[in-house]
Image (tube, helix red, strand yellow):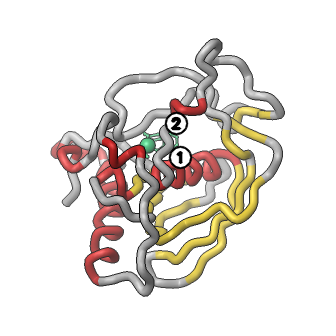
Amino acid sequence: MITMDDIVREGNPILEEVAKEVALPATEQDSATLHEMLEFLKNSQDQEIAEKYQLRPGVGIAAPQIGLSKRMIAIHFEDFDGNFYSDGLFNPRIVSHSVEKTFLSSGEGCLSVDREIQGYVPRYARITVKAINLAGEPIKLRLRGYAAVVLQHEIDHLNGLMFYDYINENNPFLKPDNAKPCDVD
Ligand code: K2U
Ligand code: NI
């Protein structure tokens, strides 16, 4: 099983690389790894298992975060509207997005960053993502708000980008233009 010992931390160059597309149909190995990434998220959200193995909670994880420069991510979360997402995605790509932006008023964290970095992270408010899922099916996700934030955070990891790259250095809590927070009514 994946534990925090397997999570690559900031400073490791793999987190700044553009990850390579996964050859499809996925090999047994790549499918098994993506399944393990999804299991990690489920374990990290299970109080007993997270406690036992000292796992930090995660709603998403990208392969570069376990040292693999491959374009695959796993997601496991319920958004604020009660929509539940739990899957592994090969070669996810944002095929369209809104002009409007959003952000989490609580800021963002990262399993690969062992320090708190405060500030608003501007994200597209709505995105459409295409990918091949763990079952090998082509999927299209139309996401907004929190779900859009999670997918953008994870797809950024495939492009060597970290959430703090977007925070306004002079005024981290400057409300981003044309943006509304997605975690407050
Ligand atoms: O990629 C990662 O490091 C996993 C992040 C993803 C993420 C961070 C901030 C906002 C959206 C997604 C972890 O899930 S951060 C920990 C966490 C746990 C529960 C809820 C929100 C963030
Ligand atoms: Ni992250």
Q: Which mark is residue 153?
A: 1
Between 92 and 182, the residue placed more toward the observer is 92
| Helix, strand or loop under label 2 | helix
Ligand 1 closer than 8 Å to label 1 CB: yes
Q: Which amino acid type is shown beneath numbered disc 2? A: Phe
Q: Are marks 2 and 1 in contact (CB under 8 Å)?
A: yes
Q: The C terminus appears in which quarter of the rendering?
A: top right
117 left or right, relative to 97: left
183 left or right, relative to 111: right
Between 12 and 110, the residue placed more toward the observer is 12
Q: What residue is disc 2 on?
A: 163
Q: Residue at x 65, y 18 (%)?
A: 173
Ligand number 2: quarter of image: top left
In this view of the protein, can residue 163 be seen by the observer?
yes
Q: Residue at x 62, y 71 (%)?
A: 130
Ligand 2 closer than 8 Å to label 2 CB: yes
For residue 115, which quarter of the picture? top left
x, y percentage for residue 98?
Answer: 80, 51
